[in-house]
Image (tube, rainbow, N blue to C red):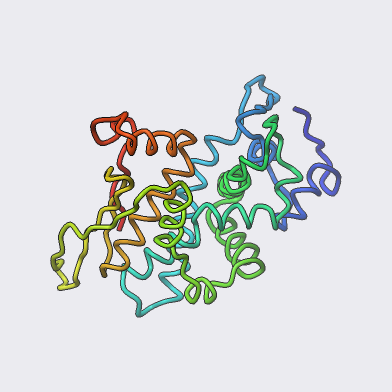
Amino acid sequence: MRAIPRKGKEPYLTFYNIVGFYPHDLSLYQQAVAHKSSSIRLNNGQWVNNERLEFLGDAILDAIIADILFKKFENKKEGFLTNMRSRIVQRDTLNKLGLELGLDKLLISSTRNVAHNTNMYGDALEALIAAIYLDQGYRVAKKFVFDTLIKEHLDIEDVVKNEVDFKSRLIEWGQKIKVDVRFDLIKSYYDENHNPIFHSNVYIADVEIATGIGYSKKESHQKAAEQALKLIEEDESFEDKILNARSGKVSQDISDIDTIQPVV
């Protein structure tokens, strides 16, 4: 991979137009837009893609959003902050932001059917945030997230008002493939601060799929539904497994569908 050394020229200018500054280490940014289906070769001969940067960027983005929300909502409890963060960094939001930034035009990929791989834009965005962090540090990464992503493309107040109804989406999915979706409250108790805590499970075709934990029964249902939808999205064979379970071809709870760990 050959990097053009003169700033103001391509490919420096391309990334400048997205992040608002010229990269120091251009290879990090080029790696960030290299999908795993199309690894690129660095000057040192190493073949890389954006998977490792995506891993780091996911953690950095979580920390930045938590930082921003903690300072913006001084009187809100941990449950509200956690719920807000999860809605901001959810895959649908990141994919949308990646597209609005124009990462689809930079993404290097040999994947044939991009329509069924739209998560690659959100993945590339997380990788880009990691590249900024490694190249410029946390402060610049936070400024990019706040000034470019949130101020220009994402209104936090709108996120507060427009909660995604994961439960309704999951029930609609069940109706579409003609399987029952059921939510059961498993237990409730008070934490050390006397806040009520609710644990709920979601069952699809009587198979336990995911657990949700929240500060209300409704929130625990939403959390469980969100995790179930994530599993459906990530496992292309999920629907077949559920239909097999319903028809009695699988005699036990689907052993090869791992129940996602509960998330508060």
Q: Is residue 178 left or right of residue 217?
A: right
The correct choice, above or below, for 254 with respect to 93 in the image is: above
Q: Quadrant of residue 187?
A: bottom left
Q: Residue furthest top?
A: 45
Front-lying residue, 195 or 180? 180
Place of residue 8 in the rendered image (x, y in percent of width and height, measured from the top left): 84, 49
Place of residue 128 in the rendered image (x, y in percent of width and height, measured from the top left): 62, 46
Front-lying residue, 166 or 148? 166
Place of residue 75 in the rendered image (x, y in percent of width and height, measured from the top left): 35, 80
Q: Is residue 5 left or right of residue 175?
A: right
Front-lying residue, 146 or 81? 81
Q: Quadrant of residue 31?
A: top right
Residue in the picture at 43% in, 37% down = 238
Q: Residue furthest right?
A: 9
Q: Quadrant of residue 199?
A: bottom left
Place of residue 65 in the rendered image (x, y in percent of width and height, measured from the top left): 48, 62
The correct choice, above or below, for 77 with respect to 107 in the image is: below
Q: Is residue 216 left or right of residue 174?
A: left
Number of marks drawn:
0
Q: Quadrant of the C terminus?
A: bottom left
Residue in the picture at 43% in, 66% down = 84
Residue in the picture at 43% in, 34% down = 240
Q: Is residue 198 left or right of residue 218?
A: left
Q: Quadrant of the N terminus?
A: top right
Residue in the picture at 15% in, 66% down = 191
Q: Residue furthest bottom?
A: 75
